[in-house]
Image: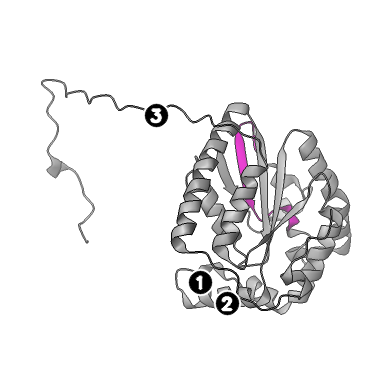
């Protein structure tokens, strides 16, 4: 694959404000794309497809936001999100890819990984959570692991969300200022700010080994959240050749009258949530 580096990795960002998109336009386009996602869902289910989508990138790059918009209108039994925590001692003793393989889709499913096996090439490498031997083994085996998935019939799509230094700092500060978002910041996130260059180097090395013809990385310019979401969803839809299998419009049947002689218990017998509002 050719070079697909963006401003967060090269340091060439010129500081221009990312192009904005009007809220009304964003909502209109998002609605169109979410309708297409529902059509894609029907297709995946009907054809028994197995789809895996990886979302990687720096902290606060917008991975969670696009995942929420993808899943918002979909059936969680068909499209599910996998966001694994710190591995247990037992999992640490397993084959590295084993705990991720447990979450791979069955026929008729799409799985979205909010961070994935690439933790080893990123945070584990930079923060020293793996040995050099474990890191080198990952770089050797990851492309083969992904080729195995593809040969088995899985559709694998990988996204890297690229965000500039200044924009990440602005989003971190917004999380600090908003009590409902503060939980998104961990001590590890703050340490990542101190190791910006190390993360850039780790990302470049990861791309060198794993940005392959069979399984390329797709980079999303994520400085503008709304554009990033629309662009990513639009691209995801383009990666699977689907048709519209939406069921015909349903008609509600008339409600059946209650059986004669049946008397419902009084409402006062039930315990209601207090009317606070």
Look at the picture and state if 231 lies above or below 205.
above
Q: Is residue 153 left or right of residue 250?
A: right
Q: Where does label 3 land, which residue?
A: 249
Whether residue 55 is visible here, answered yes or no, is yes
Say whether disc 2 or disc 3 marks the residue closer to the N-terminus.
2
Looking at the picture, tell me which residue is in the foreground, 31 or 139. 31
* Crowd class of label 2 (few under 14; some 14 to 19; many from 20; radius 10 Å): few
Say whether disc 3 or disc 1 marks the residue closer to the N-terminus.
1
Q: Where does label 1 land, which residue?
A: 182
Answer whether residue 117 is magenta in the image: yes
Mark 2–mark 3 distance (CA, rounded to whole Å): 46 Å
Q: Quadrant of residue 135?
A: bottom right
Chain part drawn in magenta: 105-118
Whether residue 76 is visible here, answered yes or no, is no
Give the label, 2 or 3, closer to the camera: 3
- Which residue: 57% across, 57% down? 229
Q: In this view, does 37 lie to the left or right of 196?
A: left
What number is the disc on residue 170? 2
Say what secondary structure mark 3 lies in: loop
Look at the picture and state if 73 lies above or below 231.
above
Answer yes or no: do the residues labelled 3 and 1 have beta carbons within 8 Å? no
Answer whether residue 204 is magenta in the image: no
Give x and y (percent) for residue 148. 81, 39
Say whether disc 1 or disc 2 marks the residue closer to the N-terminus.
2
- Which residue: 45% across, 68% down? 180
Q: Is residue 169 left or right of residue 131?
A: left
Give the label, 1 or 2, closer to the camera: 2
Answer yes or no: do the residues labelled 2 and 3 have beta carbons within 8 Å? no
Mark 3–mark 1 distance (CA, rounded to whole Å): 43 Å
């Amino acid at each position: 694959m050719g070079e697909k580096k963006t401003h967060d990795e090269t340091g060439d960002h010129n500081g221009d404000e990312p192009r904005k998109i009007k809220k009304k336009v964003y909502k209109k386009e998002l609605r169109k794309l979410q309708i297409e996602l529902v059509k894609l869902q029907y297709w995946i289910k009907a054809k028994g497809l197995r789809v895996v989508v990886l979302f990687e990138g720096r902290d606060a790059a917008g991975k969670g936001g696009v995942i929420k918009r993808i899943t918002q209108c979909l059936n969680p039994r068909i499209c599910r999100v996998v966001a694994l925590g710190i591995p247990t001692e037992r999992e640490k003793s397993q084959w590295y890819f084993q705990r991720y393989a447990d979450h791979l889709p069955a026929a008729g499913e799409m799985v979205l990984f909010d961070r994935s096996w690439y933790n080893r090439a990123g945070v584990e490498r930079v923060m020293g959570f793996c040995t050099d031997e474990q890191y080198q083994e990952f770089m050797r085996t990851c492309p083969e692991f992904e080729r195995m998935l593809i040969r088995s019939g899985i559709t694998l799509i990988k996204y890297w969300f690229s965000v500039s230094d200044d924009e990440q700092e602005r989003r971190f500060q917004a999380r600090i200022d908003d009590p409902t978002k503060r939980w998104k910041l961990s001590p590890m996130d703050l340490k990542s700010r101190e190791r910006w260059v190390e993360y850039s180097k780790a990302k470049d090395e990861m791309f060198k080994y794993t940005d392959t013809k069979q399984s390329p990385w797709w980079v999303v310019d994520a400085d503008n959240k709304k554009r990033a979401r629309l662009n990513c969803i639009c691209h995801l839809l383009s990666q699977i050749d689907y048709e519209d299998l939406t069921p015909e419009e349903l008609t509600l049947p008339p409600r059946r009258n209650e059986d004669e002689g049946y008397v419902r218990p009084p409402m006062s017998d039930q315990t209601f949530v207090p009317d606070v509002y």
